[in-house]
Amino acid sequence: MSIPLTVLEGIIDASGAAPRIEALLPIGVRHRQLRVRTLILGMMLALADDRPAHLTRVHAALTALPAQDQARLGVTGNWPRGPHLLTYRQTERTFNLVADALAQAHPGGTPSDDLACVCDDLLEASIPGQYKDTSTALAVDWTDVETFSRPPRHATTECADPEASWGHRTSNLPGPKGELFFGYYHSAGTMVREETGPPVPELARRMTLTTCHLDPVRALVPILQRMPASGIRLGDVLADSGYAHRAAAAWAIPLRQAGAQLIQDLHPHDRGPQGTHAGAIIANGNLYCPATPKTLLELQPLPRDATPDEITTHDTRASELARHKLGRISADDADGYHRVTCPAVMGKIRCPLRSPSMTLSRDRPEILTPPAHPPPCCTQQTITVPAQVAAKTRQKHDYPSPAHRRSYARRTGAERTFATIKDPATTTIARGWCRLMGLTPLHLWLACLHAVRNQRILDAFETRQADNARRAATGLPPKTRRRRRQTLAMLAAAPP
């Protein structure tokens, strides 16, 4: 896909990144022909043409522009001896100045504040205004990015990229599912549709890069916390169990304070009963009646290959489990405390300890053996739940209910984001994609890559929406995706 030059220039100008970086660069004795704005434009042009992140490609993309654009952008300069075409050495010099200005004075494995803000603004500027407020939901994930440097030799620490380190990644190839790599962890937050909202283009809204000896989950939290300060409201945040299994102070609590609602898969160690509070059983982020059947509390999420009958049975058990949950009767206060009450008081179950509930219809579950010594949750009208109770596992929907399953299905948008930037047919970030070493150059290149990818996603989304509108106007149903998986029954039924 060829992205118009005006579109890329509009992104750079809307972000305001170029003048801020220019202000950080040292003032040299000689005039610098290549400006920061033109450099970033050249990086995006190289990536838009499916070229690797090489400075030679940046120079080639800029010198291939029409003559009038070269003169306007400073690629062709007016020197005392006549017109002068930009050289590769000038391109390399300007990029090194930018990398030095945006790098941390003492590298610690994370991007500097200047670099993080510049990349945030570039990504935000790549999202058109009509889509900025269509959704506040983000799907987050991290992936591996190998450095071009060779790993240090055994029993040594010296290599060409001292900021890189050993990390672990999961492989879908035959053989072992996990392997080591030498490089960085790349995290991204992708915009996905609201639960009941219209479709939206899955655009990368935030990203960061960290060395592998740091936790990518903790590194992403400050990036997301800066969004409300920039006027971008945080809504649903969808994450897998790698995020949910972190300590509550490292992930769940900071995001709740920022206004986010968590929708995440729970790690197997965090599922099921995890203690009690005032006699109520803590399980899957909620409080349940002490007489809740153990088989319901140990309900697991559906497997991917579940049959329709298994789905129906699972959803029936999830609905019965929800009847035993203590009902919330107040929102969180400033300290994160809220109040809940017994499910029998709310009319969801029948319990002898709550006499009015025994007049309810018998289609509700009934507690046959109530506790011999009723705890406070069974004797008090309400109980107070502190912020530390189920702080790590508490989320928007009951786990693993059908509502949670449908909402969590949106998280695949994050995986599609990484799939597009790792696609060998376009731009792949495999080793050798960027031969510049260090966190700052690679971080800046990845930000430009996501900004370019957003334009491709936008074009495909708008084309698809226009096609659906055309089909609807002619009375045709929306075009569905072709079924790629063929079963043995389908092959047997096919004519010879």
Image (cartoon, grey):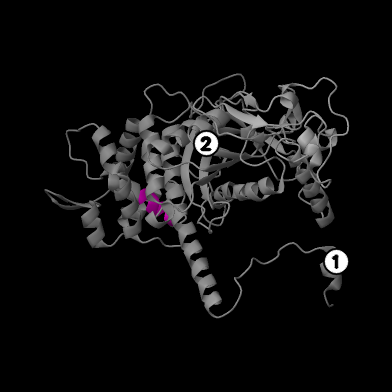
Query: Which residue matches tag 2?
Result: 147
Residue labelled with disc 1 = 489
Q: Residue at x 28, y 62 (%)?
A: 66
- Which residue is most to the bottom? 474
Name which residue lies at 68% across and 28% down: 381
Say if the magenta span includes residue 43: yes
> Mark 1, mark 2: which one is toward the viewer?
1
Residue 213 visible in rendering: yes
Q: Where is residue 305 in the image (x, y as percent from the top left)?
A: 79, 52
Q: Helix or strand or loop: what does disc 2 sit on?
A: loop
Q: Is residue 275 covered in magenta? A: no
Q: Is residue 242 left or right of residue 52?
A: right
Q: Depth check: 466 or 357 in front?
A: 357
- Percent across and percent down for residue 391 are 62, 27
Q: Does 382 appear above or below 51?
A: above
Mark 1–mark 2 distance (CA, rounded to whole Å): 46 Å
In the figure, is residue 27 to the left or right of 453? left
Q: Nearer the viewer, residue 418 or 428?
A: 418
Q: Give the range drawn in magenta.
A: 42-48
Main SS, magenta residues: helix
Q: Quick check: 373 above or below 474?
A: above
Using a 10 Å C-alpha cutoff, classify the residue at mark 1 as few (fewer than 14 neighbours), some (14 to 19) or many (20 or more).
few
